[in-house]
Structure formats: structure tokens, C-alpha cells
Image (spheres, rainbow, N blue to C red):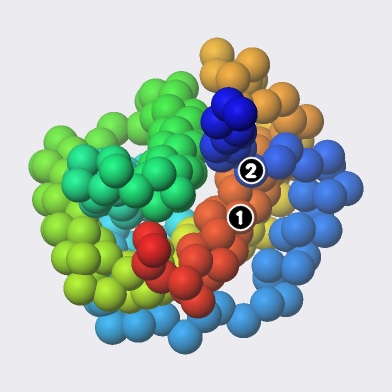
């Protein structure tokens, strides 16, 4: 008898795109839900960002959020690649590692779309940004966050997943609060060269609601990983 072929691993999918009523409901749900009890690393990062960029929610600050948001997925992907090079002889284990790589890549790509759209909006509004504060400092924050996410994952994966859940929960609430604070976004159409790739929305309000919902999906995925918090 021949060897029974195994099915290919399922590739991770990006968060679902919601309709206007669904986005409004998602925003209401977020605003009615208390924020997570953030750990010390997450709270420290949020304090640093408030000191550097102010407490007011604005596009430039969201751009920094998105620059940092990709980092845990890059760190997990790197750890997974290291793991898979040492476990290729264990088929099932290697398959699970591959699925983690695909999942991390999908989440990282989703955060990349957020960043590209935010950069486009900032450029369209001709917002001037200090290069030190909005390029070099975010790169330093991202580097530190990468090292922390990587180290926590190696020491205890649940710590890294918990940190990411804190960060994504914060981002979810910030985007939804931003829409609530700026009702004029409802009247501003979403026009973007990335719309065909990311999604079509009736307004900028719905765009930011969708981004906030994406962050919720990422948070829930990290929370789902907490019980296992390991590759094996």
C-alpha cells in the first residue's frame, strides 16, 4: 500500500472585512469593553509614546503604533524558522511550525496595509513630521520591542503572546476612540490607491473602525494561543 498523503497546511487568512452596520456595532462593543489590565512592559511602552507624541490621538501617532505593531509577528516568524530548521525530521511538529509562520506572516501583512494607508493619509494632508521623532525614534522603539518579544517568546511564549494582546487591545481602543472623537470622519470618503488591496469603505470613519477591528482579531488570536503557548 502507498503512503497516505497528508493535506497541505491551511494558510492563515486576514481579518474579515465588515459592513458599515457591523463596523458601527464593533466600535460600540469595543468602547463598552474595559481595556485589558496591561502588564508592565506594555504600560511602559504606552507611557513612552504619550511622552514623545502626546496623549492626543492623531495619524502620526497611529503610524508609530503600526510600525511597532508588526514587530512581534516578525519575531515569532524568526523563532519559527529557527525551530523548523532543527525539527524537519518531526513531520507533524514541523507542520505546526509552518502554520505559525503563515499565521505570523498574514498578521504582519495586515499591519503593513494599515501603515501604508496611514502614510498615504498623512502625505495627503501635508502633515510635516520631524524625521528624528517620526522615523528614527520609532525605529528604535521597534528594535527594542522586537528584542523583547523575541526574548519573552524564547523564555516563555505566553509572556510574548500576552504582551502582544496588550498592545493590540490598546490599538483597538485607540482607533475606535479616535472615530468617536472625530464625527467629521463620517463625511470624509475613503479614497486610496490601496483600497483594492485592503478594502473599500464608505468613509474614513469606517476605515478606522475596520483597522480597530483588525487589531481586535489579532488580540483574540494571541489570547487563543495563551493556553498552549508552545510549538509542541
Picture layout, residue 217 above or below residue 67: below
Residue density around tag 2, few if under 14, some if 14–19, many if 20 or more, within 10 Å = some
Q: Nearer the viewer, residue 62 or 226?
A: 226
Q: Quadrant of the C terminus?
A: bottom left
Q: Residue furthest front?
A: 1
Residue 161 shows up from this direction: yes
Residue 179 horizontal side relative to residue 51, left or right: right
SS under mark 2: loop
Residue 213 horizontal side relative to residue 124, left or right: right
- Disc 2 target residue: 15
Q: Position of residue 30 (x, y in %)?
A: 68, 67
Is there a contact, CB below 8 Å, between mark 2 and mark 1?
A: yes
Residue 64 shows up from this direction: no
Residue 180 horizontal side relative to residue 10, left or right: right
Residue at 84%, 50% (x, y): give it.
22
Q: Position of residue 182 (x, y in %)?
A: 64, 52
Q: Quadrant of the N terminus?
A: top right
- Disc 1 target residue: 217
Q: CA distance from mark 2 to mark 1?
A: 6 Å
SS under mark 1: helix
Residue 68 horizontal side relative to residue 120, left or right: left
Residue at 21%, 59% (x, y): give it.
150
Amino acid at each position: 500500500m502507498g503512503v497516505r498523503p497528508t493535506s497541505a497546511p491551511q494558510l492563515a487568512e486576514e481579518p474579515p472585512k465588515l459592513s458599515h452596520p457591523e463596523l458601527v456595532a464593533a466600535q460600540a462593543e469595543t468602547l463598552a469593553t474595559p481595556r485589558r489590565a496591561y502588564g508592565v512592559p506594555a504600560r511602559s511602552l504606552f507611557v513612552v509614546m504619550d511622552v514623545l507624541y502626546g496623549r492626543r490621538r492623531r495619524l502620526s501617532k497611529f503610524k508609530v503604533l503600526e510600525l511597532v505593531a508588526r514587530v512581534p509577528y516578525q519575531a515569532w516568524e524568526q523563532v519559527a524558522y529557527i525551530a523548523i530548521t532543527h525539527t524537519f525530521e518531526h513531520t507533524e511538529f514541523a507542520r505546526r511550525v509552518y502554520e505559525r509562520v503563515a499565521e505570523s506572516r498574514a498578521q504582519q501583512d495586515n499591519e503593513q496595509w494599515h501603515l501604508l494607508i496611514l502614510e498615504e493619509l498623512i502625505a495627503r494632508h501635508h502633515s510635516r513630521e520631524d524625521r528624528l521623532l517620526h522615523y528614527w525614534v520609532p525605529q528604535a522603539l521597534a528594535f527594542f520591542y522586537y528584542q523583547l518579544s523575541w526574548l519573552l517568546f524564547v523564555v516563555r511564549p505566553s509572556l510574548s503572546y500576552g504582551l502582544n494582546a496588550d498592545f493590540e487591545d490598546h490599538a483597538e481602543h485607540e482607533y475606535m476612540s479616535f472615530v468617536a472623537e472625530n464625527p467629521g470622519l463620517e463625511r470624509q470618503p475613503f479614497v486610496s490607491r490601496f483600497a483594492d488591496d485592503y478594502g473599500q469603505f464608505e468613509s474614513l470613519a469606517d476605515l478606522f473602525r475596520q483597522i480597530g477591528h483588525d487589531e481586535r482579531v489579532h488580540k483574540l488570536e494571541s489570547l487563543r494561543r495563551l493556553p498552549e503557548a508552545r510549538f509542541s
